[in-house]
């Protein structure tokens, strides 16, 4: 009989999450007792995120490669990198949130609740066991539901209600799938489960469980047959929360799918799972772009276009077929960084030009170049990256994914994927450049002068992502080499 | 699979499908939430059946069920709070009438 003890050295391995946990407790108490101003809580949350970011970077530099709690939690180079990406994205989201007019019932919670949600996302990245995965996933979902539901307008609560019901049903399917895998193997650890699963004996049961698991994670990512909730929930949330949903939640779910596929699903039923994912990704790539053409409210537009980007992020996984090599992981990480930069930047732009009390609409950009020319320039950089035009992070990200799909998947599958990526990109020009057209070729609309210039945090986020996108577009090789070098020993081992 | 375990697994499957049917057809928000719970508890029953009759020596399954219960309780707590706030604000308790984001979608 072994006893489980959690030593101090274990907590050091989990340092990024521990810092977030401490931070959220301190900030909540400070918010209760000290009647601090809203902005100071927001800045406090930003400091906590920076602390966790520092811890994650230190782990990455020290090449920490350790497991805690019998391997339920693993800190390796890849998960540290994913955490850094998620933390940077969350910093951007908080930057957007600080200084927005308060549209919620809450005071400080609007900032502090991002931290447990992010903690869930980070645990999800490191989790190598189903119970941990489930708890992390629900921590992420429930915190996000509260963030959405705190909006004063009724549509916020409606969006939260939809996410509760849909999240609940998809969690139930995930758990139902897991319960059969547990029934076949008697364990919940990915690695042990993969070694004990026996396709010869209970093939149909295992296949059904796998399909349930893939489908329920696809709901969380909002791949196409399961995408309807993402539009409504995105539109019902306030702008920073919509940004969090479309960047942090989505990336965390995609990382979970990669992890689960590579560790548990691919060793046993790679062909079935890859076929299911192939269909989902192809349909998502087409339908998301076509749906986006019809959207005029910006939050819906970005909720839909996020689905197309998410589908792109799954292409390296299905292209590799069985076990993704270093290249696939590197390409994935590169596009994840690009995705974070361009989407956080886009939401910062929406937030900066948005008038409180209305739904963000594409008309809010009308004549922006006359009001705030430099902001307009930054937005153009981000739109270029989103559309995937040259000298931007988005362009090289798409190019790498396209080339990977063609080289890894021979035959029609690779060509179909590549063709769909190209066609989708062309369609996306139509809706992304609507924003540019509004900014430059429309007279200043009935939009009252907003505080575009005075919101320093959101401006910093906007410029940071715009410059980051351009920099990554100018020197893509630098980041690719760095990423490949960092994760090389993780993936090989 | 022993006969007892098969019976439990079938019961769990029945409950799961019943819950799913409820989520898809009922219009009262609270009943929808209850149906989601029925689905989650069906999973708990499934795990327990495997843990008890599957011939495994450890208590993984039992612990898993505790986690499912605790997390779904947290989910319901948030769910009921949001539902009550929404129903009070809108004055209707019918998920079809509460769905205005859907109407926004139609107008476009």
Image: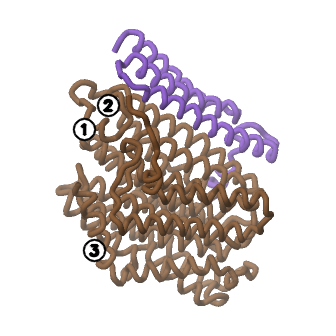
Q: Position of residue A331 (x, y in %)?
A: 31, 66
Asked whether residue B17 appears in the rendered view, the answer is no
Quarter assignment of residue A460 = bottom right
The residue depicted at 77 percent of the width and 69 percent of the height is A37
Q: Are marks 2 and 3 in contact (CB under 8 Å)?
A: no
Q: Which one is nearer the viewer's eye here, A330 or A211?
A: A330
Q: In which quarter of the image is the N terminus of chain B?
A: top left
Disc 1 or 2, which lies upstream in sequence?
A: 2
Q: Which one is nearer the viewer's eye here, A59 or B85?
A: A59
> What residue is pinned by disc 2?
A206
Please state the chain letter of the residue tagged with numbered disc 3 in the rendered image.
A
> What residue is pinned by disc 1?
A268
Q: Position of residue A54 (x, y in %)?
A: 48, 69
Query: Looking at the rendered structure, which numbered label has been put on residue A66?
Result: none
Crowding at mark 3 (Cα within 10 Å: few <14, some 14-19, many 20+): few
Q: Position of residue A364 (x, y in %)?
A: 66, 75
Supply the letter of whichever chain is brown: A
Number of numbered tags placed on the structure image:
3
Q: Which one is nearer the viewer's eye here, A150 or A1?
A: A1
In the figure, A217 relative to A436: above or below?
A: above
Tell us which disc is closer to us: 2 or 3: 3
The residue depicted at 30 percent of the width and 27 percent of the height is A204
Query: Looking at the rendered structure, which numbered label has been put on residue A481?
Result: 3
Q: Are marks 1 and 2 in contact (CB under 8 Å)?
A: yes
> Judging from the image, what secondary structure is the residue with disc 1 in?
helix
Disc 2 or 3, which lies upstream in sequence?
A: 2
Q: Distance between the residues labelled 1 and 2?
A: 9 Å
């Amino acid at each position: 009989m072994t006893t489980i003890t959690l030593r101090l050295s274990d907590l050091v391995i989990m340092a990024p999450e521990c810092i977030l946990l401490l931070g959220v407790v301190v900030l909540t108490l400070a918010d209760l007792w000290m009647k601090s101003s809203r902005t100071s809580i927001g800045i406090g949350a930003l400091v906590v995120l920076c602390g966790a970011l520092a811890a994650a970077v230190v782990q990455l530099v020290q090449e920490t490669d350790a497991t805690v709690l019998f391997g339920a939690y693993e800190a390796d180079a890849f998960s540290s990198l994913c955490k850094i990406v998620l933390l940077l994205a969350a910093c951007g989201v908080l930057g957007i949130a600080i200084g927005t007019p308060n549209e919620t019932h809450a005071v400080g919670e609007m900032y502090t609740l991002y931290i447990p949600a992010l903690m869930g996302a980070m645990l999800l990245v490191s989790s190598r066991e189903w119970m941990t995965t489930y708890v992390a996933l629900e921590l992420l979902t429930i915190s996000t539901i509260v963030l959405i539901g705190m909006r004063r307008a009724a549509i916020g609560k409606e969006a939260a209600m939809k996410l509760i019901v849909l999240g609940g049903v998809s969690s139930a399917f995930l758990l139902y799938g897991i319960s059969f895998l547990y029934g076949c193997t008697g364990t919940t650890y990915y690695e042990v489960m993969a070694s004990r699963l026996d396709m010869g004996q209970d093939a149909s049961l295992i296949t059904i469980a796998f399909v349930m698991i893939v489908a329920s994670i696809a709901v969380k990512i909002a791949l196409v047959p399961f995408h309807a909730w993402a539009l409504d929930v995105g539109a019902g949330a306030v702008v920073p929360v919509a940004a969090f949903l479309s960047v942090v939640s989505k990336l965390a779910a995609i990382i979970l799918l990669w992890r689960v596929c590579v560790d548990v699903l691919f060793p046993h039923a790679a062909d079935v799972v890859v076929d299911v994912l192939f269909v989902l990704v192809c349909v998502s790539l087409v339908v998301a772009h076509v749906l986006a053409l019809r959207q005029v409210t910006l939050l819906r537009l970005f909720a839909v276009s996020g689905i197309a980007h998410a589908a792109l992020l799954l292409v390296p996984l299905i292209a590799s077929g069985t076990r993704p090599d270093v290249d696939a992981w590197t390409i994935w990480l590169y596009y994840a960084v690009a995705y974070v930069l361009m989407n956080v930047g886009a939401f910062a732009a929406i937030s900066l030009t948005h008038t409180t009390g209305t739904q963000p609409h594409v008309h809010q950009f009308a004549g922006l170049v006359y009001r705030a020319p430099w902001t307009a320039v930054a937005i153009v950089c981000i739109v270029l990256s989103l559309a995937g035009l040259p000298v931007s992070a988005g362009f090289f990200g798409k190019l790498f994914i396209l080339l990977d799909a063609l080289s890894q998947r021979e035959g029609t599958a690779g060509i179909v994927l590549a063709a769909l990526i190209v066609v989708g990109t062309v369609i996306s020009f139509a809706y992304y450049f609507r924003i540019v057209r509004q900014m430059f070729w429309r007279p200043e609309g009935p939009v009252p002068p907003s505080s575009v210039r005075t919101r320093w945090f959101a401006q910093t986020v906007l410029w940071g992502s715009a410059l980051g996108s351009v920099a990554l577009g100018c020197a893509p090789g630098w980041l690719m080499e760095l990423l490949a070098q960092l994760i090389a020993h993780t993936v090989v081992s | 699979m022993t006969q007892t375990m098969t019976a439990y697994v079938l019961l769990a499957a029945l409950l799961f499908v019943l819950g799913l049917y409820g989520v898809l057809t009922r219009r009262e928000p609270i009943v929808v939430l209850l149906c989601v719970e029925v689905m989650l508890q069906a999973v708990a029953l499934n795990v327990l059946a495997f843990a008890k009759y599957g011939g495994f020596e450890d208590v993984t399954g039992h612990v898993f069920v505790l986690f499912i219960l605790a997390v779904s309780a947290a989910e319901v707590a948030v769910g009921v709070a949001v539902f009550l706030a929404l129903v009070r604000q809108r004055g209707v308790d019918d998920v079809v009438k509460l769905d205005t984001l859907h109407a926004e979608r139609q107008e476009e």
